[in-house]
Amino acid sequence: MTNNELEIWVVDDDQSVRWVLEIALPQADMRTRSVERGEHLLEALGNATPDVLITDVRMPGMDGLTLLDR
C-alpha cells in the first residue's frame, strides 16, 4: 500500500457486489472495506473518514439515502 491510495468503503446487501468491488478496487491501488448494511457502516466508521463511500440505495433496514443523510 502507498500513501496515495484511496480508501473506498462499500455498503451493499448483495455479497456478490461487495466481492467484485473487493477484488477490482485493490487492483487499481485502492484500499477497500465492505459491510452488508448501513447500520454496520455507522458502527464501523468510528472516527474513520473514507475517501469514497459506495452504497446501494435499496437495502433492508437503513437504505443508502438515509445512510448518506447520517
Image (cartoon, rainbow, N blue to C red):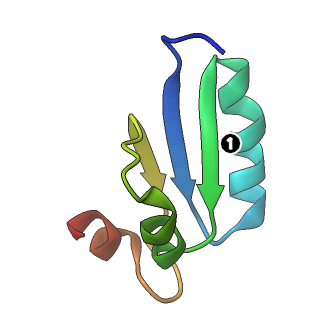
Q: Quadrant of the C terminus?
A: bottom left
Up-down relation of residue 45 to residue 65 (above or below): above
Residue depicted at 75% across the width and 44% down the height: 20
- Please provide percent x and percent y for residue 55: 46, 58
Toward the bottom, the furthest residue is 61
Q: Nearer the viewer, residue 51 or 65?
A: 51
- Please provide percent x and percent y for residue 66: 29, 76
Residue 30 figure quarter: top right
Q: Quadrant of the N terminus?
A: top right
Q: Nearer the viewer, residue 30 or 3?
A: 3
Q: What residue would you read off at disc 1?
A: 21
Q: Amino acid at mark 1?
A: Leu
* Local SS, label 1: helix
Q: Nearer the viewer, residue 51 or 56?
A: 51
Toward the front, the furthest residue is 47
Crowdedness of circle 1 by 10 Å Cα count: few (<14), some, many (20+)?
some
Up-down relation of residue 12 to residue 8 (above or below): below
Up-down relation of residue 19 to residue 27 (above or below): below
Q: Is residue 52 left or right of residue 37?
A: left
Q: How many marks?
A: 1
Q: Is residue 55 left or right of residue 65?
A: right
Residue depicted at 62% across the width and 39% down the height: 32
- Please provide percent x and percent y for residue 44: 51, 62
Residue depicted at 55% across the width and 74% down the height: 37
- Please provide percent x and percent y for residue 12: 59, 64
